Amino acid sequence: MTRSAERLSESEMIAWRTFMEMQEVLRGRMEQQLQADSGLSSTDYTVLVALSEEPTGQLRAVNLAQRLQWEKSRLHHHLTRMCQRGLVERRSGEGRSSLGAITPEGLAALQLAVPAHTREVRRMVFDRLSEQQVQQLTDISRAILDGFDRDLPS
């Protein structure tokens, strides 16, 4: 079957719309859960997780932006808001580089958020899937992400 670049097939349209609806509902519910349980936004949580996974608790801003797939300006503005709340701090790195670093307050907020967030992810996603479906979700997500990597200019 030849796929038209101009139209999605009926099954592709159903899959796409279902995927988009699921993504929006899941994103909204996860955002509500994080706010209610920890006062963190999902973007706060994402930044804190990335920083906490580093042995030093810090990353060059350019590397953090790359890891999160964010524009530099988005990261700058979000780090500014997180600094004002004491969750992260900016540090000077080698040369003119800037570092984002998790603070003790940020680590405490993350540690408070993780158990409830994990329970909610399990309840909303993984408790509804078989082991085979979890593997399929991984495989499908990886195929799409790998395709993005191939789309990048060399």
Image (cartoon, rainbow, N blue to C red):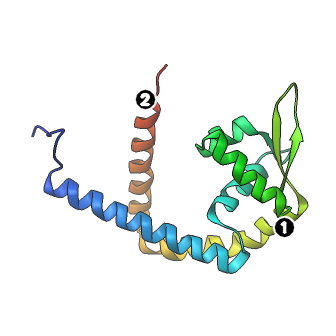
Q: Which residue is mark 1?
A: 108
Residue at image x 38%, y 55%? Answer: 136
Mark linked to residue 150: 2
> For this rendering, which residue is in front, 106 or 75?
75
Q: Which residue occupies the extreme top position in the image?
A: 154
Q: Up-down: is 114 above or below 154? A: below
Q: Is residue 129 left or right of residue 3?
A: right
Tell me the crowding category of disc 1: few under 14, some 14 to 19, or many 20 or more residues within 10 angstroms, Cα based: few
For image coordinates 40% across by 43% down, the residue present is 144
Q: Which residue is at the front of the view, 85 or 68?
A: 85
Q: Is residue 87 visible?
A: no
| Residue at disc 1, secondary structure | helix
User: Residue 79 location, x and y as percent?
Assistant: 75, 52
Furthest toward the left, the residue is 1
Q: Position of residue 130 (x, y in %)?
A: 41, 68
Element at label 2: helix
Q: Amino acid at mark 2?
A: Arg
* The N terminus sits in image quarter: top left
Give the residue at x 66% y 66%: 41
Q: Quadrant of residue 56?
A: top right
Name the kind of residue labelled 1 in the image: Ala
Question: Picture coordinates of residue 36 (x, y %)?
Answer: 66, 80
Return the residue nearer the eye: 111 or 134.
111
CB atoms of marks 2 and 1 within 8 Å? no
Residue at (70, 73) in percent of width and height: 115
From mark 2 to mark 1, how far is it between C-alphas? 38 Å
